[in-house]
Image (tube, rainbow, N blue to C red):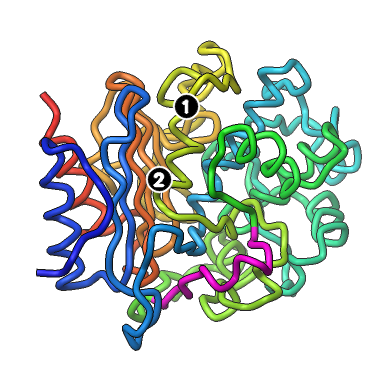
């Protein structure tokens, strides 16, 4: 059986067993972390950073966590809301006046955070390289028309949510989203989490490995369908995520770099009512904003049912192993996942380099989440 490194409380031995089993099968390299009531009860890792299996995955290994980054994006917006600098129910144009163009004046910040704004991607032609140019990319979003009536349904803001919410944050804080996360979130919490990655940390990065080819579900759809427009505006690329340009960019929806412990050290503040290790980022009532349901139905982009609150998913049959209750979650392309369970003051995080197929989660993330919950009374 594969070797698992790190530490865990005895009652969570099943989580380490699950990681060892997955490392013997589908995992290349991965880490899993769990916080329960303010205590890190699981912090484990194993496998390799590279497909040749020459470089072990270590405690400080970083990996691009894809859309798990969005969990930190929403936390950043909530931090500003907690300070009274941002009203999630206010029009986006109150903070970003140019966004009011083309029928968007009534779109509220909560619509951006819950994927219900109707602006789920960029009008094509638009490339991944175009995302790296923040001023141009945000100007283009401000100049677009919504692709469906805002507030009526969710359509996953796959690649552009970081620019949408991040520009609101930039207008309020007068700093880049990358800098805001470093100074106001990761720094105070002592978390090994970055938007992009400093060049001095590139030696720690495990390149992401593409999932097996799968049907993108675009065949037969009208070119104007939000799924087609989102998936092609721009088209996703695993190769790009391993490039220097990607690591230097400010992509609040996509290019967070961390490990399970780093993601845990950021997001457990939500599960613990807004405070972790004596650092308070949010009041409990600010955390409660997450549970204001914004949509419930088949997502226009993902094609599966999701129930979104403000900033996070509140439930979906796609991940039936995440329990209902005061629980919310999201994850990244390939299977990385973060679960915040306020009923149990529990946070679960998982990241990996070999990507699995699917919309959200994977058989691997299911194994770890189930192992955690089976250890609880």
Residue at left offset 90%, top offset 36%: 97
- Quarter of the picture holding the N terminus: bottom left
| Residue hosting label 2 | 298
Residues under labels 1 and 2: Cα distance?
27 Å
Q: In terms of depth relative to the viewer, which is nearer, 171 or 103?
A: 171
* Badge nearest the viewer, 1 or 2: 1
- The majority secondary structure of the magenta stretch comes to loop
Residue at left offset 32%, top offset 40%: 348
Give the farthest residue toward the bottom. 52
| Residue 61, quarter of the rendered image | bottom left
Residue 99: image x %, image y %?
84, 42
- Quarter of the picture holding the C terminus: top left
Q: Choose the circle earlier in sequence order: 1 or 2.
A: 1
Q: Which mark is residue 74?
A: none
- As displayed, is residue 157 above or below residue 287? below
Q: In terms of depth relative to the viewer, which is nearer, 325 or 193?
A: 193
Secondary structure beneath label 2: strand
Residue 60: image x %, image y %?
45, 59
- As displayed, is residue 231 above or below residue 53? above
Secondary structure beneath label 1: helix
Q: In terms of depth relative to the viewer, which is nearer, 210 or 24?
A: 24
Residue 75: image x %, image y %?
58, 33
- Which range of residues does the magenta coloring cover? 196-210
Residue at left offset 87%, top offset 38%: 174
| Residue 228, quarter of the rendered image | bottom right
| Residue hosting label 1 | 270
């Amino acid at each position: 059986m594969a070797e698992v490194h790190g530490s865990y409380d005895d009652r969570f031995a099943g989580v380490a067993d699950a990681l060892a089993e997955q490392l013997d099968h589908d995992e290349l390299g991965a880490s899993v972390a769990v916080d329960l009531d303010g205590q890190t009860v699981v912090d484990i890792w194993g496998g390799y950073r590279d497909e040749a299996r020459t470089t072990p995955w270590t405690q400080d290994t970083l990996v691009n966590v894809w859309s798990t980054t969005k969990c930190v994006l929403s936390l950043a917006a909530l931090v500003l809301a907690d300070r009274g600098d941002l009203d999630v129910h206010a029009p986006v144009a109150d903070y970003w006046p140019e966004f009011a163009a083309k029928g968007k004046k009534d779109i509220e910040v909560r619509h951006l955070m819950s994927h219900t704004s109707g602006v789920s991607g960029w009008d094509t032609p638009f490339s991944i390289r175009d995302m790296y140019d923040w001023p141009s990319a945000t100007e283009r979003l401000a100049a677009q028309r919504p692709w469906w009536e805002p507030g009526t349904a969710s359509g996953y803001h796959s690649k552009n949510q970081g620019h949408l919410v991040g520009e609101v944050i930039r207008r309020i804080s007068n700093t880049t989203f990358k800098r805001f996360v470093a100074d106001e979130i990761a720094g105070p919490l002592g978390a090994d989490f970055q938007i992009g990655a400093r060049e001095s940390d590139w030696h720690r990065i495990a390149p992401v490995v593409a999932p097996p080819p799968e049907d993108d579900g675009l065949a037969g759809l009208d070119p104007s369908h939000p799924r087609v427009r989102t998936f092609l505006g721009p088209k996703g690329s695993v190769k790009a995520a391993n490039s220097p340009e990607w690591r230097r960019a400010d992509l609040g929806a996509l290019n967070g770099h961390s490990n399970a412990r780093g993601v845990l050290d950021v997001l457990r503040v939500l599960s613990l009512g807004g405070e972790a290790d004596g650092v308070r980022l949010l009041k409990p009532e600010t955390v409660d904003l997450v549970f204001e349901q914004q949509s419930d139905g088949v997502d226009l982009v993902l094609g599966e049912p999701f129930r979104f609150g403000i900033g996070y998913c509140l439930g979906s049959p796609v991940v039936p192993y995440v329990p209902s209750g005061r629980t919310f979650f999201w994850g990244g392309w390939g299977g990385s996942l973060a679960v915040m369970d306020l009923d149990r003051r529990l946070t679960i995080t998982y990241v990996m380099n070999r990507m699995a197929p699917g919309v959200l989660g994977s058989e691997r993330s299911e194994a770890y989440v189930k192992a955690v919950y089976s250890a609880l009374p």
